Amino acid sequence: MKLTKQFLLILITILTYSCTDKSSKEPIQQPSLNETKAAILQTLNDETKAAFERNYDEWQSKWVHEQRVTKTYLDFSEDSFSESVGWQEINAFVVTFFEEHPDPEPVPELLSDIEVKIYGDGAWVIYEQQDSIRGLKRETRLMEKHGGEWKIAGMQTTIYGFQSE
């Protein structure tokens, strides 16, 4: 009987030790706000550059390919509006635009500063950009992290055109 109690005590000790989660002793490193902002900025600049250079493969790789994504343009200078809902509609809009306007356009000065609010694996981003063809643009982007990469899940662009001074 004494041997059985010792055996059980040893077995319980071994099981307790082997079931201890050793990984919880080391905290998981989360990217800093500056690192996250830099990664989002890179995605936005890469997507803009790809769109203006008519690089379809690179452009589409920066987007979430799901039905819930949206893209909206308000162009005050041309008094126009367009809205695309869902990846298929956004993709079709851009494919048609690239076919109708196959020549690359001058890439706007790439972004160096954006306003960002992080929500876990999502982010809300706003910025202004000067486009040599369209003038001043204000953009809002909804970003999501997929497979460790930031992608665009929503885009709202307001084009004001060239402002006279």
Image (cartoon, rainbow, N blue to C red):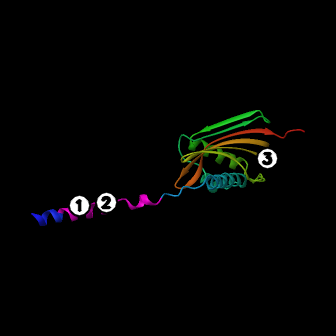
Q: Secondary structure at mark 1?
A: helix
Residue type (three-letter) at the residue carrying disc 2:
Cys
Q: From the viewer's perspective, tell me whether residue 132 is left or right of residue 117.
A: right
For the residues labelled 3 and 2, the Cα–Cα distance comes to 58 Å
Height in image: 119 above or below 104? Answer: above
Residue 124, how many percent across, how many down?
A: 62, 43
Mark 1 or 2: the one toward you: 1
Judge whether residue 9 is colored magenta. yes
**Disc 3 secondary structure class:** strand
The span from disc 3 to disc 1 (Cα, nearest Å) is: 68 Å
**Disc nearer the start of the sequence (1/2):** 1
Residue closest to the eye, 138 or 114:
114
Mark 1, Cα crowd under 10 Å, few <14 / some 14-19 / many 20+, is few
Residue range highlighted in magenta: 8-26
**Quick one: quadrant of the C terminus?**
top right
Which amino acid type is marked by label 3? Gln
Assign the N terminus to one quadrant of the image: bottom left
Q: Earlier in the sequence, mark 3 or mark 1?
A: 1
Q: Which residue is mark 2?
A: 19
Point out residue 45 in the picture as x, y percentages from the top left corner.
Answer: 69, 53
Kind of residue at disc 1 = Ile
- Return the mark for residue 130: 3
Residue furthest top in the image:
79
